[in-house]
Image (spheres, rainbow, N blue to C red):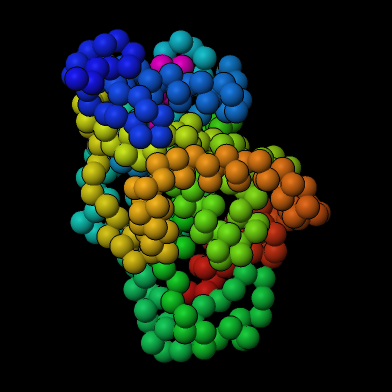
Amino acid sequence: MNTCSKCGNQQIIIRKKHSGQSLCQECFIKSINEKVLKDTRKYKLLEKGDKVLMALSGGKDSVIALHILNSLREKNIIDIVAVTIDEGIKGYRKEGVEIAKANTRALGIEHRVVSFKEYFGRTLDEMMGQDDIRLQDGTGHGDAGKDDKSHRGNTEPRHACTYCGVFRRWILNRVAQEEGATKIATGHNLDDETQSILMNYLEGNINNLIRIGPKSESRDERFTVKIKPLREIPEKEIGLYAIAADLNVHLAGCPYAGESFRREIGEFIKELSRDHPTIMYSTLRGFDKIKPILKKELTPKGNTGECRRCGEPAAGELCKACSFLEGWE
């Protein structure tokens, strides 16, 4: 009979194919906590005195990251303020917001709820509705820093995830500035990272590829450093942790995610992992080895400018968020 590799308990809740370990509930929870804190030290994600803005959706990843990082807050090593972004997705976001509130109340952590509507004057649902209208009347999409005349008639639709990612990143950086945060923590896990590596490679998005890592690095101090404490934890183990630790998490999936390229890549990786359980780890390790070379050769030269509309850092006349907004006006 299999027993826990750590303590000998016969009540096993997981057998890890990639490591060969079998763990009971208590040892599994402890192993995840220790792994996340070890990676936090290894990659120097946090320093004593940091004020961390936790991007808290209410989903399992961000809730678990919040609870584990809270152990450092309780030791007065860091401070935490959480922010939940309401994208304005009907029938989906409300429950996640309430779960985020419940978790921060339980831990005694300051919490803000902000929205696309508040910062951009429209919800994600409204943005997608406007996109449908523009595609139907042939006006297409505007483009940052370019003459829109050359882009009118572009009838290729953008997926909601494109807009959501751009606007969420804009809000996180702005709220971090408002709160005086020194770090932004997100709940990205191992599956997310390997998906991002493959997606950006396959699409030729080199600028995005070189930004992937446990800790963002920018020469521009206007960008708050982003960290990913769960980067080396598989999504499957995060789900099990939420159950084992009896955490209150939002389990519903975003209705816009069903047709995304990321979902297709995720399914491809999961299929590979069935016969090759270490594939996500090897993908991550391989990328981390070549990233310094990519960064040295491909990092854009010159200084980042300022968006003429919002004042946020921008490579051109407009930041990406404002280029979308102007395209709808």
Asked whether 9 or 171 is in front, the reply is 9
Which residue shows up at 58% across the image and 59% down it? 201
x and y percent of residue 5 in the render?
32, 17
Magenta range is: 65-72
Task: Using residue 9 as the reference point, say whether residue 116 is left or right of it.
Answer: right
Q: Quadrant of residue 177?
A: top right
x and y percent of residue 281 in the render?
49, 39
Task: Using residue 88 as the reference point, say whether residue 150 is left or right of it.
Answer: right
x and y percent of residue 104 in the render?
32, 28
Q: In which quadrant will I find the N terminus?
A: top left
Which residue shows up at 27% across the image and 29% down it? 14
What main secondary structure does the magenta stretch of the protein show? helix
Any magenta on residue 69? yes
Asked whether 201 or 282 is in front, the reply is 282
Any magenta on residue 35? no
Which residue shows up at 37% across the image and 70% down it? 128
Asked whether 144 or 115 is in front, the reply is 144
